[in-house]
Each structure stands twice: as C-alpha cells, then as structure tokens.
Image (cartoon, helix red, strand yellow):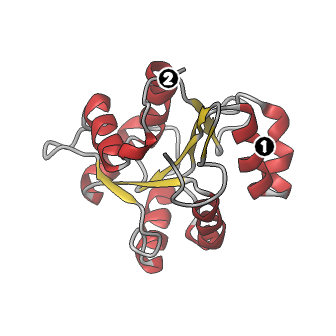
Amino acid sequence: MLHERRGVMETNGKGSRIILHVSGIPATGKSWFCSYLARDHGFVHYDLEWFPQGWPVPELYPVWCNAPLDFVRQASGLHPKIAIDWGFPPDHLPLVRAFRDLGVRLLWFNGDVEQARRLYAERGGRDPNGFEFQVQRIRQSGLPGTLDPTVVETLTPGGSVRPMEELYAEVFAAHASMAPLDSR
C-alpha cells in the first residue's frame, strides 16, 4: 500500500497510482527508459521538453505552463501510471520538491560524465554546449543529493546504457511498494 506521502501516489479502491519523474545527467537513458515503461509496462510517457510530440494529452500543456502541480494532479486523474521525462534545470528544484511532496517518485539517472558526453554527441541534433551547461548547473546545485531521489547508475563500464529490463528491475526493487507492476 502506498501511504508514504498523501497525494497522487496513494492507493485507492481502484488500484495504485504511480508517477515517476525521471531526471538526471543528460544522455543517461531517461527518454529510452520512459518509452520502455510506456511500451512494455503500461505507463503513459510525458516528455515535458518535447511538445506536442511528447504529450499524450496535449491539452495539459497549458496547465503545465501555468500550474505544474495541477498538471501532476490532472494527469494522475487521467492515467494510473505515468513516467514524467524531464531533465529539469536546477533552478526548478523547488518545483521538483513539490512534486515529491505530492507523492511523485523521483529517479535520478546517473553515469560517468565523459561517457554521457560521448553519447550526447553521438546522438546529435543538439548543441554540445547544452550538455556542458546542464552538467555544470547540476554540479553547482549539489544534485542529486539535495533531492534524495532513487539514484540509478545507467551507464555500463563500456559506456552504453544498461538494458532497460535491468533498470526496471532495479527501480522497482527500490520501490517494491509500487507493485503490482504490470497491472494495466
């Protein structure tokens, strides 16, 4: 039963609500993992940085822009299992803490920065300076420690992203209270 924090994560008579916020170092597999959750485990994936393509319910975008906590509440009323994909700017820490206080489970995808930098460059399509800027801000803000998230080391020693099934097992072992995992 999920009663750790009152809010969107609590169990009700209809089953549990699970909202994960996946953030972390750029190029550590956040979007891949959220897509995997959607494809294989019945989650709804909101990629907050990819509107309208990353929004299953685009009508919620103005809610996100004007009242992000209301976005979480409204989305949780529509979907029992949500993966929020948002590598947030560190100056949004108060908002992410408010998500946590609503019961959103925070995951931090971590990995060797040099390997992540290489993966970021290989995927292309984005300014490499964006990677450097975000990593610098992450370091300056003390993340992830200031949030107390579940930290997941996603990169292998060889520099690739670990298999999604492994990450899933690790995340849900850390949050065993989120079962049932595959109820759709």
Give amino acid for label 1: Gln
Residue 138, quarter of picture: bottom left
The picture places residue 15, in percent across and down from the top left corner, at 58, 33
Q: Nearer the viewer, residue 21 or 104?
A: 104
Considering every residue shown, the one lying at the far front of the view is 13
- Few, some or many residues within 10 Å of mark 2 (<14, 14–19, 20+): few
- Dot label at residue 13: none
Considering every residue shown, the one lying at the far left of the view is 157
Judge left or right: residue 66 versus residue 19: right
Q: How many angstroms separate mark 1 from mark 2 (CA)? A: 21 Å
Q: Residue at x 81, y 39 (%)?
A: 60
Query: Closer to the N terminus: mark 1 or mark 2?
Result: 1
Judge left or right: residue 115 versus residue 4: left
Label 1: state its secondary structure. helix
- Dot label at residue 183: 2
The picture places residue 117, in percent across and down from the top left corner, at 33, 52
Q: Nearer the viewer, residue 164 or 140?
A: 164
Look at the picture and state if 162 lies above or below 3.
Answer: above
Look at the picture and state if 64 lies above or below 129.
Answer: above
- Dot label at residue 74: 1
Q: Residue at x 61, y 65 (%)?
A: 101
Label 2: state its secondary structure. loop
The picture places residue 61, in percent across and down from the top left corner, at 80, 42
- Few, some or many residues within 10 Å of mark 1 (<14, 14–19, 20+): some
Look at the picture and state if 143 lies above or below 55.
Answer: below
The picture places residue 47, in percent across and down from the top left corner, at 61, 39
Q: Nearer the viewer, residue 15 or 128?
A: 15
